[in-house]
Image (cartoon, rainbow, N blue to C red):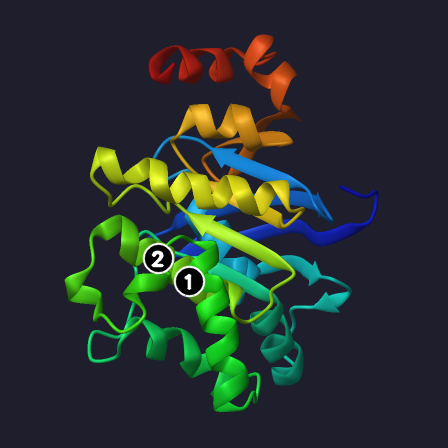
Amino acid sequence: MTDEPIIEAQALTKRFPGAVVALDGFSLTVLRGEVVVIIGPSGSGKSTFLRCLNGLEEIDAGAIVIDGIPLDHHRSNRLLIRQEVGMVFQSFNLFPHLTVRENIDLAQVQVRKKTQAEAARTTLALLAKVGIAEKADRYPQELSGGQQQRVAIARALAMSPKVMLFDEATSALDPEMIGEVLEVMRALAAEGMTMVVVTHEMGFAREVGDRIVFMEAGRTVEEAPTERFFAAPREERTKAFLSQIL
């Protein structure tokens, strides 16, 4: 981890129809190589924040800068940011008519403009990295949920992102499959990947997170280094939340 910010989100506001305020002046700075874990009750704005970071949701106010590139109305900036920011969702979003190999090759060839041979080498290396190299020619429906999520992680990594966003990446998995996905995420953190992780897996948060952010109602309730956050939370709302999930 360095002292250099790679994500700067300032005073973000996001409203949805029906006067629902998902983000209410929310700010967060993430350092290069840092793992920030965001926790909080359902509807607190965690997933909305991640989707705003790569332009999947439009902010109503505030500013986002990623690796020096402002996420503004310029199409070129948005394309650059989407290439530099990988995102893994709750659902795997794999193309069912393509094999695992083809799912991972696709964006490398179409977006990164790699040759098919270059993409193939990267794909096989990443499948080995996430522990499923032998599944390269299978179709998504032939894989377990944990294996499909590992393919989704490999697909995001194939774009050589500078930042990885994980939005409840294990919440759709059976309990026995959660560990295999968390293990891949642990390895990425150990390699120095900048990560923003929304999760309910508190064991993972304590082990891997450099900093914990507790959100509620679109705002930061408490933010602290991981050890202090769990050992000595300062806010009563944080203490109440942790007492329910630990």
Q: Residues within 10 Å of mark 2 (few under 14, many from 20)?
A: some
Q: Residue at x 55, y 71 (%)?
A: 159
Q: Position of residue 89 (x, y in %)?
A: 37, 55
> Where, quadrant-wise, is the N terminus in this rendering?
top right
Whichever of labels 1 and 2 marks the residue nearer the N terminus, that label is 1
Q: Quadrant of residue 155?
A: bottom left
* Residue kind at label 1, given as amino acid type: Leu
- Say which of 99 and 222 sits in front: 99
Q: Secondary structure at mark 2?
A: loop
Q: Secondary structure at mark 1?
A: helix
Q: Residue furthest left?
A: 141
Asked if residue 93 can be seen in this view, the reply is no
| Residue 127, numbered circle | 1
Is 90 located above or below residue 171 in the figure?
A: below
Alpha carbon distance from label 1 to label 2: 5 Å
Q: Position of residue 31 (x, y in %)?
A: 74, 45
Question: Disc 2 marks which residue?
Answer: 132
Is 158 located above or below residue 105 in the figure?
A: above
| Residue 5, numbered circle | none
Q: Position of residue 12 (x, y in %)?
A: 60, 51
Q: Position of residue 192 (x, y in %)?
A: 67, 46
> Where, quadrant-wise, is the C terminus in this rendering?
top left
* Residue kind at label 2, given as amino acid type: Ile
Whether the residues at callouts 1 and 2 have beta carbons within 8 Å, the answer is yes
Q: Residue at x 25, y 79 (%)?
A: 98
